Image: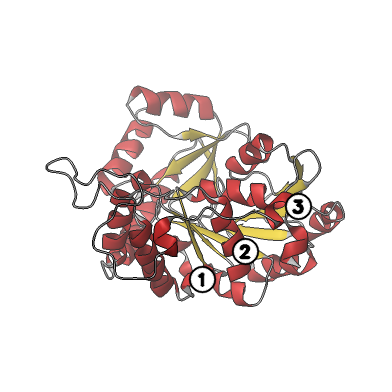
Amino acid sequence: MITNLLRENIKNLKAYSSARDEFEGEASIWLDANESPTSLPNLPNGINRYPAAQLKDLKKQIALVKGVDASQVFIGNGSDEAVDILFRCFCNPGKDKALVFPPTYGMYNVCAAVNDVEVIESQMDESFFINLNSFEKRNEEAPKLTFICNPNNPTGNTQSAETIRRIIELSKGIVVVDEAYIDFCPDKSVIKWINDYPNLVVLQTLSKAWGLAGARVGLAFASPEIIGVMNKVKFPYNVGKPSIDIALDALKMNGLMEQRVVENSLNKQLLINGLKQFQIVEKIFPSDSNFVLIKFTDHKSVYSTLAKNGIVVRDRNSQPGCERCLRITVGTREEVEKLIYCLNQM
């Protein structure tokens, strides 16, 4: 099935191969890649070398943490790279379509536009849950890629397992479940489903709960067949050694990420409780993530007040169903308290 979905030029693509990929002995001197034999002083050891071996180590560690096989793991320069590569693997420019459920993460549309792929939209209800009837009608257009952001950005809610399963089973293309925020609600992940559905790709990241947004380490999980194709299409050495080293260290800090998630949950409740006291707050949408979507009676005044006090939030007013809404990330306790204080001065 997967081979039939690939672009014709990708089916016959020969992956880039380095001498180190082909070497089978015990190497001690590296004269194959035209690297500098020495690095600059006071920089990490090995920074003068391409990070092929370290990337394999990171893949093994991710597989261990996530409970999958290393052959089911793709590592990208942020999960946006994985999104773009999926378009390049499966969507013929000017011909194929991708399906999204707005309001949702904006990079799906950006990557589609870059790759000359038409985006079709399926409706969600007023509480931002997928309307399966709408999906089934749109699915008749045979989208090559269907993106489900879960938890959804910018709304924060999660779709039911039954809804996601139904979409996967009905789709004749690739279904991408973007779990960038799943570490805030790990019991709702569908990563284990990659063993059951060959057309499923699950995206995750170390940018959110793991606190490594600056390292740009994105993850994709799928069948070895899909991962193999993605690895053929990606650029060699797409993740740098400093990012790999940082990610490896973070993944070995047992329990720390989970502790931070608990702290974030407490601060989120502090934010919600603080917002409830204001008459300008019209609605606070339920969130399984590290942010909250809030509808205000006058979102522009709120945005302006916060901006004058050096607080940056995201205006989502232009998104479908998000009229007068701001998306507020859960910060530290002190940051949340300052935000509430500023609103109290309005």
* Residue type, numbered disc 3: Glu
| Residue 321 coordinates in the image, percent (x, y) | 67, 41
Is 218 rendered above or below residue 58?
above
| Mark 3 in CB contact with mark 1 (< 8 angstroms) | no
- Which quadrant of the view contains residue 317? top right
Q: Residues within 10 Å of mark 2 (few under 14, many from 20)?
A: many
* Residue type, numbered disc 1: Ser
Is 174 rendered above or below residue 25?
above
Q: Which residue is mark 3?
A: 8
Element class at badge 2: helix
Q: Left or right of 248: which side holds 157?
A: right
Q: CA distance from mark 2 to mark 3?
A: 15 Å
Q: Residue furthest left?
A: 42
Task: For the N terminus, give its image quadrant.
Answer: bottom right
Mark 2 or 1, nearer chain start? 1
| Residue 343 coordinates in the image, percent (x, y) | 38, 33
Q: Nearer the viewer, residue 243 or 109?
A: 243
Element class at badge 3: helix
Q: Give the foreground label among 2 and 3.
A: 3
Q: Which residue is mark 1?
A: 71
Element class at badge 1: helix
| Residue 264 coordinates in the image, percent (x, y) | 35, 56
Task: For the C terminus, give its image quadrant.
Answer: top left
Residue 211 appears in view: no
* Residue type, numbered disc 2: Ile
| Residue 300 coordinates in the image, percent (x, y) | 51, 25
| Mark 2 in CB contact with mark 1 (< 8 angstroms) | no
At horizontal 55% and vertical 70% (from top left) the residue drawn is 191
Q: Residues within 10 Å of mark 3 (few under 14, many from 20)?
A: some
Q: CA distance from mark 3 to mark 1?
A: 24 Å
Is 303 rendered above or below residue 244?
above
Q: Which residue is mark 2?
A: 226
